[in-house]
Image (cartoon, rainbow, N blue to C red):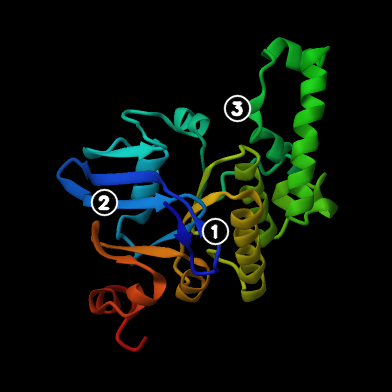
Amino acid sequence: MSDRGTSGKKIGDVILDVQNISLRFGGVKALTDISFDVREHEVRAIIGPNGAGKSSMLNCINGVYTPSEGSITFRGQQFDHMNSRQVAEMGVARTFQNLALFKGMSVLDNLMTGRNLKIKSNLLLQALRWGPAEREEIQQREFVERIIDFLEIQAHRKTPVGQLPYGLQKRVDLGRALAMEPQVLLLDEPMAGMNVEEKQDMCRFILDVNDEFGTTIVLIEHDMGVVMDISDRVVVLDYGKKIGDGPPHEVRNNPEVISAYLGASH
């Protein structure tokens, strides 16, 4: 089954299915009985006020947290007690709200760390850069150079990441996740702290990743203008519970969502 998303693109079958997820820390409930799905090639937004449980939800999907109840199924395979590396190997990559880049390393080297899952040579051969390991590194580097071109950061490829403006650092973070060749890309507030111009650039890159690479995208974002512009469907959380789910125009007009998140003035 497939249909057309908000931009007329073809949306595929369910690729990620989240069913009845609850998450507790001691006696505190972070998430309560949340279900939603993500379909192939869509941009799926998760929104809600601070403390709604959005990042906790992403942490459950990419293996940082193990849900107290419920199941998560990726391409028909249910995963329980998976760590982040195993989830990444399945094809799910993640960017973080607080940048986790290697600030003293160059842009190129930061993106190369995203290729670690793809490297087959053992550590000794990599260290010696001998034979198959050298050929493999050249292939991985070529792939990373394509991402650098795609994200328009050629001029900064040898610059230590810590010397770049914040907006460019966020772009490098996106590039490192893309270097993993994910089928599903989880973006945790990719535009937080950006000015208007940087947000416009990031929106364009997210839509290009979705369109040109065919990557399915799940994003948390506070800027409602951005969410309404680029999302195919939106799920709304409040106090760890789901209060809305549907196309942007439906969610925007949902009275419960308006009172919880958007404010009556919107």
Q: Residue 133, how many percent across, how many down?
A: 77, 17
Front one among 205 and 58: 205
Q: Mark 2 or 1 closer to N-term?
A: 2
Q: Residue furthest left?
A: 27
The quadrant holding residue 125 is: top right
> Pointer 3 and pointer 1: residues touching (CB < 8 Å)?
no
Q: Residue furthest bottom?
A: 265
N-term mark: 3 or 1:
3
User: Dot 1: few (<14), some (14–19), or many (≥20) neighbours within 10 Å?
Assistant: many
Determine which residue is flagged by label 1. 190
Q: Position of residue 184 (x, y in %)?
A: 50, 45
Residue at 41% from the left image edge and 64% from the top image edge = 233
Quadrant (top left, top right, bottom left, bottom right) of the C terminus: bottom left
- Residue carrying label 3: 117
Report helix, strand or loop for mark 2: strand
Residue 198 or residue 39, whichever sits in front: 39
Residue position marked by numbered label 2 in the rendering: 35
Judge by depth and name the residue closer to the eye, 6 or 205: 6
Query: Pointer 2: residues within 10 angstroms few (<14), some, or many (20+)?
Result: some
Residue at the spot x=34%, y=75% of the render?
250
Q: CA distance from mark 2 to mark 1?
A: 23 Å
Give the amino acid type for the residue marked by disc 3 in the picture.
Answer: Leu
Instruction: Name the amino acid type tagged 1.
Output: Pro
Q: Nearer the viewer, mark 3 or mark 1?
A: 3
Of all residues, the one furthest to the front in this rendering is 1
Could you tell me which residue is drawn at 28 percent across and 77 percent down? Answer: 254
* Residue 250 located left or right of residue 25: right
Query: Which mark's residue is nearer the viewer, 2 or 1?
Result: 2
Tell me which residue sits at (73%, 55%) in the image: 151
Q: In the image, residue 113 lies at what x, y percent? A: 66, 33
Going by the numbered disc 2, the residue's amino acid type is: Ser
